[in-house]
Image: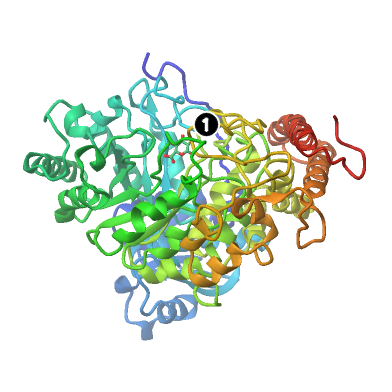
Amino acid sequence: GRDARPLTPTIDPCWLGPAVTAVLRGRHVSLLAAGPVTDTLRQELEAAVGPAGTVGGDLTGEPVLVLARRDLLPDATTLTGPVRRAVDAAHGLGGEGFALVGDGRSAAIVATGERGLLYGYFHLLRSAATAGSADALPTLDVVREPALAIRMINQWDNTSAGDHLGSVERGYAGDSIFFRDGRMVADRRRIADYARLLASVGINAVSINNVNVHPAAVRLLTDGLPDVADVARIFRGFGISTYLSVNFASPLVLGDLPTADPCDASVVAWWAGVAERIHREIPDFGGFVVKANSEGQPGPFDYGRDHVDGANLLAGALAPFGGRVFWRCFVYDHRQDWRDRSTDRARAAHDHFAALDGRFADNVVLQVKCGPMDFQVREPVSPLALAMTRTNTVVEFQITQEYTGQQIDLCCLLPQWQEFLAFDVSGEGGDTLACALARRSASSGVCAVSNIGDDANWTGHKLAQANLYGFGRLAWDPALSPREILDEWVALTFPDAADLHETLVELQLGSWSTYEMYTAPLGVGWMVTPHTHYGPAVDGYEYSKWGTYHFADRDGLGVDRSVATGTGFAGQYPTAWAQRYEHLETCPDELLLFFHHVPYLHRLHTGETVIQHIYDTHVEGARRVVTMRDLWRSLEGRLDDVSWTNVMERLERQVGSAREWRDQVNTYFFRKSGIPDRHGRVIH
Ligand code: BDP
């Protein structure tokens, strides 16, 4: 029955444990602001100061911390100390920015809007934790604003567990914290805790249901709406706007109309009515996320219309209320024929959307996956993300580790995301992708598929919390390095393990490249078990309709995506990159097999042959996992038992999986090529 299974009682506070707020224990603080986020902030402060402390609403009583909206403070000339300096520094800030000044004895956060105050408060906690002094206010003088306007999380939560891939599609941390048995959960405390975690890293938007909107989920637009409104209220308190994924065929699915044709007047009116009803319940409703004509989902093609017709239909309905449509560009033919070499899934998003640039309504945001395929451990940046200069764009990342170890294997994805965001768009030393997104519009930015579920530690693998934390931090400031982010995360998450700080940071930092080493080599991708996507199956997708191939034969492997002899995908990039990827001499090693089909004895820039590289990296990758496991084993008793045991158990499984990958991949390529491993390690 509904909510029959109780929510897990002990919930891991992740990076917001009690030690982190200890700095304010027993103190007097002041909060000068008003609104839903301020109400949340007041509760935060009350919890932080504890029964011995106080939260006031003015500047009296010598507060140790002042949080104030600039317009509510008295004239600057009457102020002194950190407040005075923060007021001056806050000049000209937007609604999400803040100035934070602390002199070690007291501190002040001044902002234009209440969200800035919330972000400033979490910044203060972070600074205190990373300074290593949980009970001393830090000395600092900073002004911060987010680099990207849209910083969104997508839940792939189904309303019921029976839908397709379980309660959370591609979720590896238990069931949904939002839905159970077709309805919103009644106990919403975990949703509030989640909102708090997200706000603490600057997330400002969330879509709460799966992009594959199964028939039951369509009801969120109708009978489910009051529950959605309540969840939106919770998120509102943390400065986060709520979105719903919608099924393009909703008017049909709900049985209201005989068609969902975007150019049909009754369909236009239907969506306008839906948007109006939603806004009556949720005045600040964010809008819709849409997966249309993708992997079997309905869309405008079903009526001979195009993506502009489809997206602009929903945008028109939402526009009067300030809502947006996130229109996903993950559109490709999932029924293609492996015998037909002229099709290339990598080309699809750009082929479908690039020519439509400039035709979308102002409140349409195209949501483009970071790579051209689908969240593989290594892909080039999506050429579509670079191409749309006149359309709002968010780049989509995947925090949930669908293809990167499913939160069994440790794989910290921050270096991958950072590489994407730092990508030199023109290839000639101009804007990075992050700068280009920031410049593009106030409706551009990033989004990512969440990795949380109702497991006690949220992410299944304790160390996978860093991916959620880090996504938010990178979205706020893409110039942060993975090491800086991990320094924060470790200090906040393991405040009692300062002596292990470096060990924990290093473990995370190296894990993505280790994962890459023992899985699919040199950008080729897709050697995973079909459907589940965990563990090796070298030929699993080789003769499938999904368009995901490695083309290995006795002479060589890789996909020829050059313009001269291949699928032409390389030509979708700006000229400098197109040139670089086109030619073997300039194509980076790590993407060689994404762009080229080469003989096994082709030499990489490292001087090594492709086949020997495959053997070496697979042996080395699996060896590194053993080293990680042994290192973790040696930490027994030095971290809390729950975390230690959780990670230990997963590292044991990772050792087994990495061996399987090593042996299957190496044996496969030995059998195909007949070329022995120079060191004789490959099982024949
Ligand atoms: C793929 C997943 C699938 C998602 C799809 C998407 O395997 O479950 O529905 O992406 O992004 O990676 O729509």
| Up-down relation of residue 442 to residue 373 (above or below) | below
Percent from the top left, x then y, of residue 557?
68, 45
Tell me which residue sits at (59%, 52%) in the image.
560
Residue at the top extreme, as displayed:
1
Tell me which residue sits at (37%, 62%) in the image.
444
Q: Amino acid at mark 1?
A: Ser
Front residue of this view, candidates 139 and 377 = 377
Q: Is residue 552 left or right of residue 325?
A: right
Percent from the top left, x then y, of residue 488?
63, 57
Residue at the bottom extreme, as displayed:
77
Q: Is residue 140 left or right of residue 494?
A: left
Q: Which quarter of the frame holds ligand 1?
A: top left
Q: Say which quadrant the C terminus sits in.
A: top right
| Label 1: how many Cα within 10 Å (few below 14, some 14–19, many 20+) | some
Q: Quadrant of residue 446?
A: bottom left
Q: Is residue 304 left or right of residue 217?
A: left
Q: Quadrant of residue 257?
A: top left
Percent from the top left, x then y, of residue 562?
56, 58
> What is the secondary structure assignment of the residue under circle 1?
loop
Is residue 524 shown to the viewer in this render?
yes
Q: Say which quadrant the N terminus sits in.
A: top left
Tell me which residue sits at (31%, 43%) in the image.
290
Front residue of this view, candidates 678 and 509 = 678
Q: Colour mode? A: rainbow
Front residue of this view, candidates 8 and 352 = 352
Percent from the top left, x then y, of residue 451?
52, 40
Q: Is residue 275 left or right of residue 80?
A: left
Is residue 239 shown to the viewer in this render?
no
| Up-down relation of residue 167 to residue 461 (above or below) | above
Label 1, on which residue? 544
